[in-house]
Amino acid sequence: MKKTLSLVLAVCLLHNCLQAQLLEKKSKFTHADTLRGMLTPLRTCYDINYYHLDVRFDIDKRFISGSNLFKFTATQDFKKLQFDLFANLKVEKVLYKDHELPFKREFNAVFVTFPKSIKKGSHEEFTVFYSGHPTIAKNAPWDGGVVFTVDSAGGKPWVATACEGIGASIWWPNKDHLSDEVDSMLISISVPTGLKDVSNGRLRKVTDLGDGYTRFDWFVANPINNYDVAANIADYTEYTDTYDGEKGKLDLDYWVLPVDLDKAKKQFADNIKPMLKSFEYWFGPYPFYEDSYKLVETPHLGMEHQSAVAYGNHFQNGYLGYDLSGTGWGKDWDYIVVHESGHEWFGNNITAKDLADMWIHEGFTCYSESLFVESQHGKQAAQEYIHGLRRMIENKHPVVGIYNVNKEGSEDMYPKGAVLLNMVRTIINDDDKWREILRGLNKTFYHQTVTYDDIIGYINKQAGMNLSPVFDQYLHYPKLPTLQVSWQDGKPLIRWIANAKGFNMPLRVRVKGGEYRFITPTAVAREFDIPGASKENLEADTFNYYILLSGINKGS
């Protein structure tokens, strides 16, 4: 009974995890969704180079006020552009060359008109001043906004932002589209004196403003996507360490509540360096050496905020103590440390251009969990961990979302994405090449935004085979492919039944007790010569392949 209850709890936790940072399901879209999600000429006309976000948090009133400086390069001639800020926050003014610009608001979009045409190739800037009561996250990180709470020890304020999916414009003005990452950024957060802010990048300066507030200036030297920009405010204490990584000495910086310092030191010592060693082996150097690696204790479960990873797993292994795979392999490492840090490579280094391809972030990162298991316990353990994640795949909706309306796909992007990548590894059947592909992705698309075709095209080229139909089936269609086997004159006739055009996934089959061999069925049934095969003993590899079977046995 106790075991059953634990399984039910773990399943519920995983279901919540799979929905983390995802927007609510929508079947109908509006003009507001298009303004939020589409790359219109009013957005493509300028390329963001630099932000200076300067925000004051009045925690008692749950009120923010400040400005954001936009520095950009014009990609074409234009007089009008769009930036984004949620409608519940007031745009006080937009300043350009000491003059206020006229602007118009429509839903959460703001349209600014310049006095004369901005010429292609020119470098310009404007500043948006704003204020208001930001959206309060009711259940971060599963919804977006700002968390206002107090720590359990001293009852001091504890504030954090989390806005993946819904977008950074929920709390600060920016060009809120994943395709355009700012090249570098200064983040200035002013908080009541006695508290500290921890944001992305490196701390440049702390200034007592003399009015009961202290400003913390953090500089981000690398490109960063908008939803990664974070404010974390509390009575933090800091401790540091270093890691000798592939690019040299990496600074490790930890910010936790004082009451949790001893627990943090033990938990992070057990998990951080093994995680970094594993992921640098599989994916290449940590992508943000210049900005350091930080882990910040937060009042919500966690988020992949670049170089300032949010951590709220209560200094325990598993996912809040549970193994999400149900195999036992997920209980001796900290899920939030591993998963959210995995996003530094997939999500932060490599970022999808459209939220519809959020599977690039979540599928690869969920898969990274198994690679960490492999680093610690071997390949068989990793395969078991991946296999265990299948229990939460629903196969009801496509993994790829809807483009141009800021709509991600189904929560299957986590476990189904991981299972798919493990199948691709099995198909390629060369672990050295597979590792080269994972490292090559992070090198080729270093600090870049990418499309579906970018990722699939790269894997196809490096693997030397066309895997597009495989990705198409598992990412665009909810239904699993079926391997159908019939028998004619004692010979197996085998074909795939699938939605994807040209689906011809290579598959491992064997005579029971023998060695697996690859066959490549297509949509047309054809005879395969498999010595010794019969209806009773022919098996398909269903441990490494996530498929349905008709007329053939499951392999063990």
Image: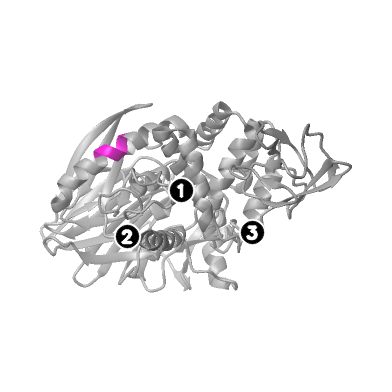
Closer to the camera: disc 3 or disc 2? Answer: 3
**Mark 3 or mark 2: whose residue is earlier in sequence:** 2
Q: Amino acid at mark 3?
A: Pro
Element at label 3? loop
Element at label 1? loop
Residue at image position (82%, 34%) is: 529
Which residue is nearer to you in this view: 217 or 49?
217
Residue 346 at x, y = what percent? 47, 44
Residue 342 at x, y = what percent? 41, 43
In the rendered structure, are the residues bearing label 3 and label 1 in contact, judged by CB atoms less than 8 Å apart? no
Looking at the image, can residue 502 be seen? yes
Chain part drawn in magenta: 269-273
Residue 179 higher or lower than 91, as above or below:
above
Q: What distance separates the C-alpha of mark 3 from that of mark 1? A: 31 Å
Q: Amino acid at mark 1?
A: Glu
Read off the residue under disc 3: 478
Residue 503 at x, y = what percent? 74, 47
Residue 367 at x, y = what percent? 49, 44
Which residue is nearer to you in this view: 95 or 534?
534
Callout 1 crowding tier (Cα within 10 Å): few <14, some 14–19, many ≥20:
many
**Mark 3 or mark 1: whose residue is earlier in sequence:** 1
In the rendered structure, are the residues bearing label 3 and label 2 in contact, judged by CB atoms less than 8 Å apart? no
Q: Quadrant of the C terminus?
A: top right
Q: Does the segment drawn in magenta span residue 331?
A: no
Read off the residue under disc 1: 181
Q: Amino acid at mark 2?
A: Thr
Dominant SS in magenta = helix
Read off the residue under disc 2: 161
